[in-house]
Image (cartoon, helix red, strand yellow):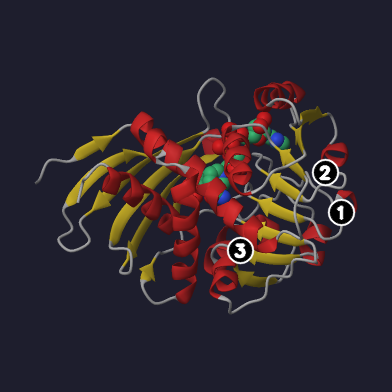
Amino acid sequence: MDTLVIVSSEKVTDILDYTILIPAIEKSLAEFSKRTGVIQPVRNVVLIPESEGFLGCMPVYSREDDILAAKIVSFFPQNKDVSTHHAVMLIFCAHTGIPKALLDGDVITAKRTAATSAVATKYLVNGKPDVLALLGSGVQARSHVAALSELFTFKEIRIWNHRFDGAVKLAEEIGLNCASCRDVSEAVKNADVIVTVTSAKNPVLRLDWVKPGAHINAVGACRPDWSEIDADLMRSAVVYVDSREGALKESGDIILSQAEIYAEIGDVILGTREAMREKTTVFKSLGMAIEDGVAAKLVIKKLGIE
Ligand SMILES: NC(=O)C1=CN([C@@H]2O[C@H](COP(=O)(O)OP(=O)(O)OC[C@H]3O[C@@H](n4cnc5c(N)ncnc54)[C@H](O)[C@@H]3O)[C@@H](O)[C@H]2O)C=CC1
Ligand SMILES: O=C(O)C1=NCCCC1
């Protein structure tokens, strides 16, 4: 075996800048929805009942991008002093199958998920957004503020968390134009963009709190029996997903509400489905291996690993 290069989270953080990641993710979402060159089975998940978590295996092959990769990601929602998600990524030569690099997957997961929401927001937001509301104050909340701020300048950012101190801490980190809120309704009032990034298993966001025409990135609730968004809101919004197949297997927000999926976000990027910007839109994100593969490829290219 050739030498397997190990890439640390520090190196991934240094290299994976949103200015290069967001356009690469946009291209990969479109490529995925073409259904021609990307082979990506829906995540295979081993449930761990004792911790209410799972270990997910996410392989992908992309002919167009010359990517053969797999991420293995764990989710332990009850972790307290360590992160709830941990991941590693393996990149193989797409022509020989030889393993080339093992990368830390935590930063890739945080950044590529936020970059994906940024792309969805770019296509679905109604006009120039002033107010951003975040429900949740963990890793994804932080990466979403950074990625969305790459594309938009928000006049106001509001944060709600089920433990108020988490919202206060993040609001302090972000600074000036950011406030912590005790109620979800207060946080999302008149918000143009809402991001749900909680580990909730039951809805935290309700239809009557949301401004008509708002855009929602629904990022948490990745199990078929979990939901973050109230069923009435799901059914009344125009729903976009990353992968239709993935959403129908994994998303409680969609399965439990029986909301109709209008399109994959890749279809919108390709121009084959409409961006209904003036309507309330939900982008239901479950996370795809092609996003990880593209992010990892950017890193190894920069490191000269070919
Ligand atoms: N769509 C995607 O591609 C990805 C989705 N995720 C999901 O995004 C969500 C956030 O992930 P991270 O920020 O990494 O996790 P985290 O553990 O860093 O943050 C979770 C947040 O949810 C809050 N929370 C915990 N239990 C809650 C409850 N019962 N009700 C309301 N809030 C609760 C916590 O206080 C914290 O603010 C998770 O559901 C995770 O599985 C994570 C990675 C990728
Ligand atoms: O895509 C991912 O990576 C994840 N999605 C849902 C939660 C676990 C990680």
Q: Amino acid at mark 3?
A: Val
What residue is shown with label 2? Answer: 188
Look at the picture and state if 199 lies above or below 265: above
Sequence order check, earlier mark of 2 and 1: 2
Residue 227: give x, y in percent of width and height: 70, 50
The quarter of the displayed image where residue 248 is located? bottom right
Give me the C-alpha separation between circle 3 and circle 2.
22 Å
- Which residue is depicted at the point 86% across and 59% down? 212
* Residue on which the image places disc 1: 211
| Front-lying residue, 118 or 101 | 118
Residues at discs 2 and 1 in contact (Cβ within 8 Å): yes
Q: Is residue 288 visible from the viewing direction of this image? A: no
Instruction: State the separation of the CA atoms marked 2 and 1.
Output: 8 Å
Q: Looking at this view, name the residue that lies furthest to the right.
A: 208
Residue nearest the viewer, comparing 125 with 69: 125
Tell me, yes or no, whether the two marked residues, 3 and 1, touch with CB atoms within 8 Å: no
Q: Is residue 74 left or right of residue 95?
A: right
What residue is pinned by disc 3?
241
The residue at the point 60 percent across, 52 percent down is 117
Please give left or right for residue 159 compared with residue 207 in the image. left
Give the image quadrant in which the ligand numbered 1 is located: top right
Residue type (three-letter) at the residue carrying disc 1: Lys
Residue 183, percent across and down?
A: 85, 34
Label 1: element kind: loop
Task: Locate residue 103, reporting x and y percent.
Answer: 31, 40
Disc 3 versus disc 1: nearer the observer: 1
Q: Earlier in the sequence, mark 3 or mark 2?
A: 2
Image coordinates of residue 35 in percent, x first then y, are 44, 75
